[in-house]
Image (cartoon, rainbow, N blue to C red):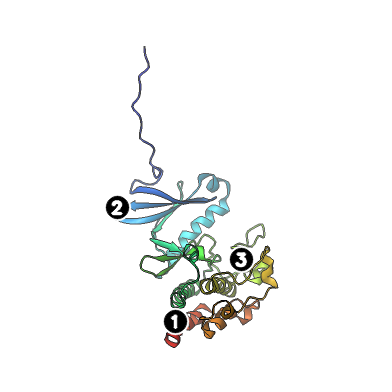
């Protein structure tokens, strides 16, 4: 008898492994650990971002699985306009976090067009500093502050994302193999020497990012990230003549090689950035 010919099947839904409440699933990012999707929550009628952990990673490395789930716990404990809200989490395969979907662009993409207008940079910097103050007040260090992890939403407000390296402790943060975690060009000198993450090292990373927004480049350059240990940054006003002297002082203080010479906390940084437009414009 001739074999029956089956009707062609539609392609599988990319989000078919997710609970059925999540529809219109579209992949928007992929990395070594997992994938990020945009989806619509049919139960609560809202758009969400869903960050998944690859099954092979979840099964082979319990530490990575715990770090992934730790991100959801940290975000759930925070309540600030600059921090995405967590809506759902799955601790069993498929392991995922569903959180607020933010329409906008990250700072890295926006920096491709060049330095920011001073007033815009002050606004963004102030909002990020306020959000980081909220995080640190609750005992959390982000540990990966950089332009890629700051989104500017369609209303022009700053949002801090990717808490995958965050830690709910103000104590040290190194992997079990002793590797310092973070993005190299944003690591403070003391972290490059293997010391623990602190609020001071977070301020250094923030200062590097603020310098980029104002000057259109990082303060330290070269083929080896260790130049951060020895290289003096250029004066921002030599790179951009309309940089206010008060802002130049703040940026250079933030990226001081000596953590004791940096501003003491993000609350003071936010107050300084918020006050500057009144004096400048």
The circle drawn on residue 274 is 1
Viewport quadrant of the N terminus: top left
Query: Are the residues flagged by discs 1 and 2 in contact, CB closer than 8 Å?
Result: no
The answer to whether residue 122 is left or right of residue 191 is: left
The circle drawn on residue 185 is 3
What's the residue at 43%, 83% (across, down)?
Answer: 277
Looking at the image, is mark 1 or mark 3 earlier in the sequence? 3
Which residue, given by chain and number where applicable, does mark 2 sit on? Answer: 43
The circle drawn on residue 84 is none
Q: Tell me the mark number nearer the camera, choosing from 1 and 2.
A: 1
Above-or-below relation of 117 to 246:
above
Q: Position of residue 193 (x, y in %)?
A: 69, 68
SS at mark 2 in the image: loop
Question: Is 277 or 264 nearer to us in this picture?
Answer: 277
What's the residue at 54%, 80% (across, down)?
Answer: 241
Question: Is 70 or 264 nearer to us in this picture?
Answer: 264
Q: Position of residue 223 (x, y in %)?
A: 67, 62
The answer to whether residue 18 is left or right of residue 246 is: left
What's the residue at 63%, 81% (across, down)?
Answer: 260
Marks 1/2: CA distance?
Answer: 40 Å
SS at mark 1 in the image: helix
Above-or-below relation of 176 to 230:
above
Within 10 Å of disc 3 (Cα), the crowding (few <14, some 14-19, many 20+) is many
Q: Position of residue 95 (x, y in %)?
A: 46, 50
* Image quarter of residue 264: bottom right
Within 10 Å of disc 2 (Cα), the crowding (few <14, some 14-19, many 20+) is few
Q: Position of residue 107 (x, y in %)?
A: 48, 65
């Amino acid at each position: 008898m001739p074999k029956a010919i089956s009707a062609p099947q539609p392609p599988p839904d990319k989000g078919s492994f997710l609970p059925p409440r999540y529809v219109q699933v579209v992949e928007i990012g992929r990395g070594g650990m997992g994938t990020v999707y945009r989806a619509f929550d049919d139960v609560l009628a809202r758009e969400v971002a869903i960050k998944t952990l690859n099954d092979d990673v979840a099964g082979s490395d319990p530490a990575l699985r715990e770090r992934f789930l730790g991100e959801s716990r940290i975000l759930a404990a925070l309540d600030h306009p600059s921090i995405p809200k967590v809506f759902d989490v799955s601790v069993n395969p498929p392991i995922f976090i569903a959180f607020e979907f933010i329409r906008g662009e990250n700072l890295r993409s926006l920096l491709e067009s060049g330095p920011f207008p001073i007033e815009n940079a002050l606004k963004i910097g102030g909002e990020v500093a306020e959000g980081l103050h909220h995080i640190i007040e609750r005992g959390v260090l982000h540990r990966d502050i950089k332009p890629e992890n700051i989104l500017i939403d369609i209303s022009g407000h700053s949002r801090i994302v990717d808490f995958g390296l965050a830690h709910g402790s103000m104590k040290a943060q190194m992997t079990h193999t002793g590797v310092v975690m973070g993005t190299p060009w944003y690591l403070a000198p003391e972290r490059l020497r293997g010391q623990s993450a602190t609020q001071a090292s977070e301020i250094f990373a923030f200062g590097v990012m603020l310098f980029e927004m104002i000057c259109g480049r990082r303060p330290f350059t070269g083929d080896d990230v260790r130049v951060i240990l020895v290289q003096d940054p250029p004066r921002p006003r030599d790179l951009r003549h309309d940089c206010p002297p008060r802002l130049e002082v703040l940026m250079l203080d933030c990226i001081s090689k000596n953590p004791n010479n940096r501003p003491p906390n993000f609350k003071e940084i936010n107050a300084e950035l918020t006050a500057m437009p009144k004096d400048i414009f």
